[in-house]
Image (cartoon, rainbow, N blue to C red):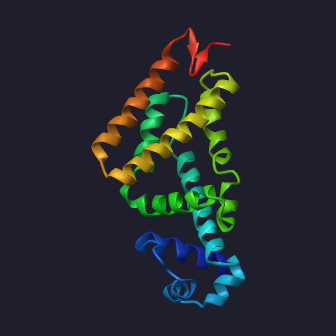
């Protein structure tokens, strides 16, 4: 059974996904979660601290989902990108992604409460992608650059989807990225991102 902090975090994730952040006060959020604002402060320090923990938990779940995509040696790089895109562009995840970009934006503006979110926000996603590429003979430096590019492209496409709602257009862009990456990995004279080393 989860500890009280984890139960509150799980409830906050579900509530914020269903209702969004808007101008919700800590007291309103606590009431919606069936607890007191003092308990939220005790466990998370502040509303903002809770939001950062919500984002971290959702990101952790997404990384776990990435690990469960079945990206074995038989999966092509393009198909791996397609699987990731289908997973991350699932409409059920949109509320979490909106919250991610909202708090991420606050961190980029230097808002102190959100700054902890930046710790590992890219790096935590790199290793699985690097290992996937290295297993296919891609040199580590190229694999690392490609992994960073992949994180940037996926986040950019998700932001585009949230901002425009143009599912067909964004899906087409994701497919174009998958095709381009697959073409690069198929050429024996080059590695993804540059000349073979």
Name the residue: 58% across, 67% down: 54
**Quadrant location, the N terminus:** bottom right
Q: Is 74 placed above or below 115 here?
A: above
Q: Quadrant of residue 174?
A: top left
Q: Return the x and y of residue 2 as percentages of the image width and height.
A: 64, 76
Give whichever of 135, 138 is nearer the camera.
138
Q: Residue furthest top?
A: 189
Q: Is 156 placed above or below 189 here?
A: below
Q: How many marks?
A: 0
Q: Quadrant of residue 117?
A: bottom right
Q: Quadrant of residue 196?
A: top right
Name the residue: 66% across, 78% down: 46
Instruction: Locate residue 102 relative to residue 173 in the image: left or right.
Output: right
Q: Return the x and y of residue 28 as percentages of the image width and height.
A: 51, 87
**Quadrant location, the C terminus:** top right
Q: Is 2 placed above or below 93 here?
A: below
Name the residue: 40% across, 45% down: 86
Q: Is residue 3 visible?
A: no
Q: Is residue 127 visible?
A: yes
Give whichever of 107, 136 is nearer the camera.
107
Instruction: Locate residue 169 relative to residue 142 in the image: left or right.
Output: left
Q: Return the x and y of residue 165 as percentages of the image width and height.
A: 31, 52
Q: Residue furthest front?
A: 109
Q: Return the x and y of residue 108 as percentages of the image width and height.
A: 62, 55
Instruction: Locate residue 104 relative to residue 197 in the image: left or right.
Output: left
Name the residue: 64% across, 24% down: 142
Instruction: Locate residue 122 relative to residue 65 in the image: left or right.
Output: right
């Amino acid at each position: 059974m989860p500890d009280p902090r984890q139960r509150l975090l799980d409830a906050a994730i579900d509530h914020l996904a269903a209702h969004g952040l808007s101008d919700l006060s800590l007291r309103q959020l606590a009431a919606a979660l069936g607890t007191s604002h003092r308990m939220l402060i005790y466990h998370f320090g502040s509303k903002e601290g809770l939001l950062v923990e919500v984002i971290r938990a959702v990101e952790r779940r997404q990384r776990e989902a990435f690990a469960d995509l079945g990206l074995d040696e038989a999966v092509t790089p393009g198909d791996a990108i397609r699987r990731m895109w289908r997973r991350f562009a699932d409409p059920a995840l949109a509320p979490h992604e909106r919250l991610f970009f909202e708090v991420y934006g606050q961190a980029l503006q230097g808002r102190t409460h959100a700054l902890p979110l930046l710790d590992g926000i890219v790096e935590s996603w790199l290793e699985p992608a690097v290992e996937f590429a290295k297993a296919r003979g891609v040199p580590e430096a190229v694999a690392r650059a490609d992994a960073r590019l992949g994180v940037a492209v996926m986040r950019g496409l998700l932001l585009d989807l949230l901002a425009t709602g143009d599912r067909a257009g964004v899906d087409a862009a994701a497919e174009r990225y998958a095709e381009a990456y697959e073409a690069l990995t198929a050429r024996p004279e080059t590695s993804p991102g540059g000349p073979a080393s």
